[in-house]
Image (tube, rainbow, N blue to C red):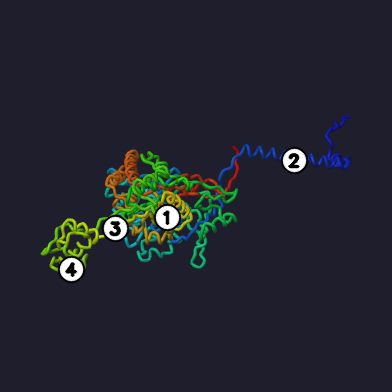
Amino acid sequence: MIKEKKSKWPNRKQWAQFFKILSGKEKITFLAFFVLFLFSFASICLNFYYSNTKPISTTGGTYTEGIIGQPRFINPIYANSDADRDLTQLVFSGLMKFDENLNIVPNLAESFEMEDEGKVYIFNLKENLKWEDGEPITVDDIIFTIHTIQNPDFKSPIQANWVGVETEKVNDSTIRFILKRPYAAFLENSILGILPQHIWQSVSAEEFAFEPHNLEPVGSGPFKIKKVKQKINQVTSIILEQNSFYHGKKPNISEVKFLFFEDEDELIRAAKKKNIQALSLSSAVTIDENWENHLMSLPRYFAVFFNQEQSKVLGDQNIRLALNYATNKKEIHQKTVDSPILPEIYGFDEPETIYEFNIEKAKEILDENGYQDTNGDGIREKITSKKPTFEFKSQLTKGSQGAEVTELQKCLGGTTSGYFGTETEQLVKDFQGKNDIDTLGFVGKGTRAALNEFCFEQLDEITELKITMVTVDQLQMTKVSEMLKGQWKQVGIELEIQQYSLLQLEKNFIKPRNYDALLFGEVLGAIPDPFPFWHSSQKKDPGLNLAIYDNSKADKYLEENRKASDLETRSSKLNSFQNILIKDMPAIFLYSPDFIYATSKDLKGVSVKKITDPSKRFIGIEDWFINTKRIWN
């Protein structure tokens, strides 16, 4: 008979009796250790899982951003506000686009080539390009877009970018642009979003701005408009969804939602309530621990531009020099700049001349040029004696006639006949008698000197160091203006600040160049071209030469920079230009602020570091994501 082998491990019935043989204290101790065991085992498993897996992006999710302002033209030929440009960036595509390093790379174009030393650009389109409605994208759409911009009846704000550019259709997928002269920065023009001809060709110039497709466009970008929500003629939100016909990499995020706000305070409140996941900030505000700020370099600078044609004070180079030394840029707490070509962004040489803050040197310059605070009011002035506009130079006797005789009669009170007769002779004798001069009755050397002093008062011209500066009515501009006012006051220069809305400033001051000084910003492109801002041909509107600067040597370098196709030549020309301009001091260059893009930590993948305008923060949006999953390493 075979005996059954007994197990040393308790069976189920024995386990059921386990708690019955334990005391109350032993039960509590056992349960405590058992829970600890479970917790430790779970921690080991989780640690193993997270150590041997990594998170990756997955598709899906809705990303919501808050924007200040209202969209009106989601249309690349009209988009002129931040809201318009932001939406246009996501809905439309150009021949070329920026990558994360601000290199210009193909988009709708498969390739391009440049001919005739930069006067001809040829673009070849990718195959099977389609609009979001499924219609094919062809060269005809590109030509239609450019011709619409060039037509003055459509009043496109970017018309000046395309003046003198000819378009030529080679075939349905190849287009040639012919320029009047070489222009290295033209490649940046090719980033312009293209309009669908089949949607817009029947719309007249008069109706173009009122066409509903300005808010519900048909585009070719990574996203398309899904829904526009309005309330009392105000757009409250716009939802975008993936464009299934997009030619590039499909985005991870399924939907993008934009909410529109009146001001930044309202925007920040929405962020704290978690109603939005991203917003642009005017200053480095920390919303809370669940948010992070992305700093993006922008090729822009703010400066005080001097109108030497309107202000006599600023027409004096010594005053401009003193102002440069009296300005402490570090108090702005932004990246300071000393040149309009932004060497630190583009990698150019620093200017030969830099005006470091030196308040004592500023005072010394003003002292040497005769500006003193003689009346103790804190404002320096210069007193210049002006000679009279008229003086007696000839010997006048009875029978003389002419202008000097007329002035003599005006001074002494006689009949202004211009003829030296008996009456005038007697008046001269009376004057001579009162002034202890021999009463000879004619005007000799001694009498002329006395008459010049008596008849024509020598005036003193007083030039006070007072400057009126206009700027836009924004918080940052207010802070900078007040800072400059305080700094310049220390050297005896009074600054009056006038602030206006952007619309008022542009219409009433910038366009007519109606200001002594202007605090304003200017933006360069990915390929630096300061020509519109500093060439003498751009002194009047619509040119952007805000300092009304005029220097033929500087003009020459700006012109040569436009023609140069290689970076080394452009760098040389722009370095020479900046050294001339900075010595002339038509402006004080202050700072170059970063663009601040705040995002919730739920949004991942934002990596762009350089942009040409705020809408370019969406470069690489295809790689942004909200949803994640883990995979084994």
Element at label 4: loop
Q: Which mark is residue 395?
A: none
Distance from disc 1 to disc 4, alpha carbons, whole Å, reads 45 Å
Alpha-carbon span between mark 3 and mark 4: 25 Å
Q: Circle 2 — which element?
A: helix
Which structural element holds mark 1? loop
In the picture, the disc for residue 377 is 1
**Which three-letter amino acid code belongs to the residue tagged 2?**
Leu
Q: Which residue is mark 3?
A: 459
Question: Looking at numbered disc 1 in the image, what kind of residue is underneath it?
Answer: Asp
Q: Earlier in the sequence, mark 3 or mark 1?
A: 1
Give coordinates of residue 303: x percent, y percent. Answer: 40, 50
Q: Earlier in the sequence, mark 3 or mark 4?
A: 4
Alpha-carbon span between mark 3 and mark 1: 22 Å
Q: Position of residue 500 (x, y in %)?
A: 43, 60
Q: Are marks 3 and 2 in contact (CB under 8 Å)?
A: no
Q: Position of residue 426 (x, y in %)?
A: 16, 66
The mark nearer the N terminus, 3 or 2, is 2
Instruction: Give the alpha-carbon distance from disc 1 to disc 2, as whole Å.
Output: 82 Å
Is residue 85 shown left or right of residue 179? right
Q: Are marks 3 and 4 in contact (CB under 8 Å)?
A: no
Q: Which residue is mark 2?
A: 38
Quadrant that contains the C terminus: top right
Q: CA distance from mark 2 to mark 4?
A: 121 Å
- Write down the residue under mark 4: 416
Residue 367 drawn at (x, y percent): 37, 47
> Dot 3, crowdedness within 10 Å: few (<14), some or many (≥20)?
few
Name of the residue lying farthest toward the bottom:
415
Residue type at numbered disc 4: Thr
The amino acid on which the numbered mark 3 sits, given as a three-letter code, is: Leu
